[in-house]
Image (cartoon, rainbow, N blue to C red):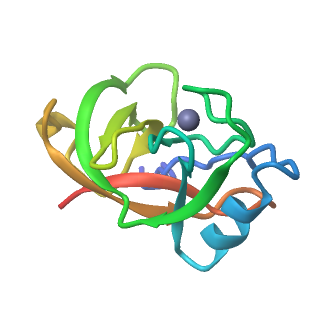
């Protein structure tokens, strides 16, 4: 009767693909710091980090530490064909960029567009931790 195994609470996340362009981001992630990039030419912030500004193509992009706070722009909750229900969606950071992410440590039934969230990091399978967001 009690042979049913308890499901894990969080979904396992595979190791992210990393490259030299994004290496500083992943190194900071290991320390729990969330980095974005800002363009020295047009002043706009972007994420994910790129060597060239996606707005004006300037190579003058600089790393900037972000508090990782913003609001949920949109999300989708997955209930079917998954051992653990989970939610993915976009967060609009206060600095401007949108981040595609997983939402964690929350009641999936009460997530709302416009809700304030903050970054945290979740371990992956054999790679650096990835940024995920939770309601504040
Ligand atoms: Zn720019």
Q: As drawn, which residue projects farthest toward the right?
A: 20
Task: Say which quarter of the image contains residue 17.
Answer: top right
What residue sits 60% from the left and 28% below the top?
54
How many numbered markers are drawn?
0
Does 70 appear above or below 25?
above
* Front-lying residue, 19 or 4: 19
**Quadrant where the C terminus lies?**
bottom left
Which image quarter has ligand 1?
top right
Specify whether residue 86 is in view. yes
**x%, y% of residue 113?**
16, 30
Task: Say which quarter of the image contains residue 66.
Answer: bottom left
* Front-lying residue, 29 or 80: 29
Left or right: 22 as drawn, with respect to 118 = right
**x%, y% of residue 23?**
79, 59
What residue sits 68% from the left and 35% below the top?
58
Q: As drawn, which residue projects farthest toward the bottom?
A: 31
What residue sits 46% from the left and 39% below the top?
101
**x%, y% of residue 103?**
36, 45
Q: As drawn, which residue projects farthest toward the front?
A: 41
* Front-lying residue, 86 or 37: 37
What residue sits 53% from the left and 75% below the top?
32
**x%, y% of residue 49?**
64, 45
Does 132 appear above or below 85?
below
Left or right: 47 as drawn, with respect to 27 = left
């Amino acid at each position: 009767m009690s042979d049913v195994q308890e499901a894990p609470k969080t979904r396992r996340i595979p190791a992210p693909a990393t490259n030299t362009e994004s290496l500083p981001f992943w190194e900071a992630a290991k320390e729990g710091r969330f980095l974005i990039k800002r363009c020295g030419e047009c002043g706009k912030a972007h994420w994910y980090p790129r060597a060239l500004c996606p707005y004006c193509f300037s190579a003058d992009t600089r790393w900037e530490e972000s508090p990782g706070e913003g609001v949920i722009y949109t999300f989708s909750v997955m209930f079917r064909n998954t051992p653990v229900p989970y939610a993915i969606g976009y967060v609009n950071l206060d600095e401007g960029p949108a981040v595609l992410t997983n939402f964690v440590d929350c009641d999936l039934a009460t997530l709302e567009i416009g809700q304030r969230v903050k970054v945290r990091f979740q371990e992956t399978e054999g790679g650096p931790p990835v940024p995920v967001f939770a309601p504040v």
